[in-house]
Image: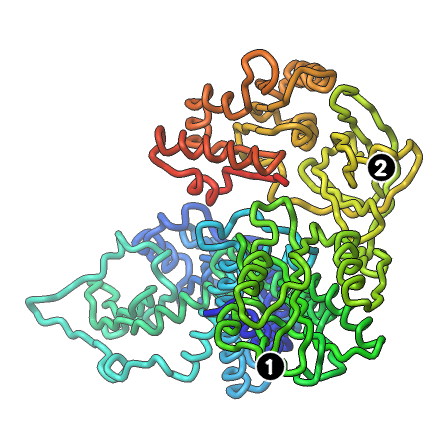
Amino acid sequence: MTLSFWRYSHLALAVFSSLFLILASATGTILAVDAIQQKIPSHRVENFNEITLAQSLPKLRKIYPEITELSIDHNQFVTLQAIDNDGNDVNAYINPATGKIIGTPTKKNDFINWITSLHRSLFLHETGRLFIGINAFLLFLIAISGFALVLNRQRGLRNFFSKIIKEYFAQYYHVLFGRLALIPILIITLSGTYLSMERFHLFENKDETENKTEAKPTANSKKTFDLKNTSLAEVTKIEFPFSDEAEDYYTFELKDRKIEVEQYSNEIISEEQFPTTKLVSDLSLDLHTGRANSIWAFILGLASLNILFFIYSGFAMTLKRRASRIKNKFKANESQYILLVGSENGSSLRFANAILKQLNDQGKKAHLAQLNNYTLYPKAEHLLIFTSTYGLGDAPSNANKFVSLLEKQNQQQQINYSVIGFGSQSYPDFCGYSREIDTLLSTQTWTNRFLDLQTVNDKSAEEFVNWIKLWSTKTEIPLATTPSLYNHIPKGLEQLMVLEKTTISDSDQTFLLTLRAGMRSKFTSGDLLAIYPANDNRERLYSIANNKGNIQLAVKLHPHGLGSEFLHNLEVGKTIKARIINNHAFHFPKKATKVALISNGTGIAPFLGMIAQNRKKTEIHLYSGFRQKTEITAHYQDFASEMKQKQRLHNFHLAYSRDENHHYVMDLIKIDADFFTNLLNDGGVIMICGALAMQFDVESVLDSICIAKNNTTLSEYKTKGQILTDCY
């Protein structure tokens, strides 16, 4: 099925059931907290699972002359209803081994009862239960469609937990939390759906209900109930005999059956197996409410809170896409200028909309549509295609039908065409889909190439304006060529002050920059700093280190480098506007006992902060590659020596590609192949930061090592969260 199907299904289901989701998640969170509170204080005795009926029942009958009922709830709290030696009624939590009263049962307060009724039936009784069941199933479908969308975004199940490309806050955390909460939400929805359906007896088996077993043993097949080997943990309720008469029996209700037992001989009088539907119903109730386990109740509470966040972030994503929605003044069949767009998150559409508005303002009949809406254009003279690339050279979701449509529908007149591709040069398939479209159009009999393919890197308004100048000159249609008109800077940037700038290496123009963030800013080493150096929508990301509460960057000055020149020209005391991006997927692992850090160039920056913050003295091995020995590498060696003395760094391995033996960081990994295989086998973590090319080379070497020595691919360790990367 197509990405569009899953996306629109996901949205439609969410819109239809949004009110229910808000109510269900809010009340579900409250009930999860209540499930945890029910276990505080705990009335469960030690070694409860080891207490048998043979140990407990005689003791209780000796202490309490008249006992009506003993019940064990999902918390394994034992409640006794009896009369004591003084003739007082007893309804209390007891220690089943000693008979001592240890607490008094309390009724749920009115608020929790009110919340429970709202959660179960919306105060509409059976009608409400039906509606809740339907919406629980809709939430299940929402989770499945969301799972399909994440699979598509991550390019398959193997990469399900791989790094997420962060486009903006709502998108990133919608996917991140969606992956983490998927299993709990599926369990919540399936168990809720089952409980609602079971309420209407949809799973009832007539054979089970009409033929309840009531076995009367014969003289040759008498069975006795083994009190010595039956734990109280297996029991949910015991009804005691009303008198000492042999005809009055014990009734034991176990997890899976009910048994009547003669009180003196322990002979089983009758036995009734519970139907499968009851067992599944009890399990569903445990899973849906978290009543049996406080940890599971806590997970359910977090999952319910996540649903509230999903509603916010999901609609935020939808509104962001709709903000750049198409607004046409003229129909397609009457327009001379046809603008077709392929965009995954709306940025390409924003550029196209700007051109559409200018053409219309000048009296030109222009029409804008998605590539998937390609059709015949009888009066078209110019075809302008604005398209981004999704994944590894693939079409965006609103352009994946264009190729097939183009093959089926040939225009009846000659049309000039021009293709503008949007992408990022950080990826190997830069503008891959736009190149495919440009080549395909060149083979059509009705097309005339008006301009060569133009590409726009990183949403650069300047590069887009270059195309505008060429197209305007050739068509003699004046369009705005001021880059700021096409810029788009995110809102909510914070001000950072330059505290210190240290040029450590004149030879390779590397410098350290220290910035002070606001008091409310929260960040750690491995997070990202996004800057907008040209005051437009071109974003530059830098991995940061937390240096004594300040942000520290290691930057190499590149000739004509937009970001590096901007940072290099900053003076102490100046402020810049930027945003801190929580890069949770690249934080230092708290539970790992051994970590290998691999970097090249300025990719070492976040690792310096991680090492300095290693107060737990986790065993860290740092592998770094540089071109040659410089002042900066000497500085890193001095830092490493200091950290070794403080036992925050175990080893520091350096490779120089243009000095000594011309080693690369991959050579260091090959030399220490046994170390890396043992580290991964022992649950250790490898973190990689730096250039994308270095990442690919390092992962290729590690993959070969893992296959040769562990008979395991590197991807398997990735799925376990043992390979963390942050490369650009």
Any mark on residue 621, and which? none
Q: Residue at x 51, y 56 (%)?
A: 296
Q: Is residue 372 above or below residue 158?
A: below
Q: Amino acid at mark 2?
A: Arg
Q: Quadrant of the C terminus?
A: top right
**x then y, percent, for residue 311:** 65, 68
- Closer to us: 282 or 261: 282
Identify the image quadrant of residue 416: bottom right
Q: Let me know if residue 370 appears in the view.
A: yes
Q: Let me know if residue 652 appears in the view.
A: no
Q: CA distance from mark 1 to mark 2?
A: 51 Å
**x then y, percent, for residue 372:** 57, 73
Q: Identify the residue position indicated by label 2 in the image.
A: 516
**SS at mark 2 in the image:** strand
Q: Amino acid at mark 1?
A: Leu
Q: Residue at x 84, y 59 (%)?
A: 481
- Closer to us: 271 or 541: 541
Q: Is residue 312 above or below residue 675?
A: below
Instruction: Assess whether mark 2 and mark 1 are in contact (beta carbons under 8 angstroms).
Output: no
Farthest left residue in view: 220
- Structure colour scheme: rainbow
Q: Identify the residue position indicated by label 1 in the image.
A: 122
Q: Of the residues under marks 1 and 2, which one precedes in the sequence?
A: 1
Identify the image quadrant of residue 635: top right
**x then y, percent, for residue 510:** 76, 26
Q: How many residues crowd mark 2 within 10 Å: few (<14), some (14–19), many (20+)?
A: some
**x then y, percent, for residue 676:** 46, 27
- Closer to us: 187 or 324: 324
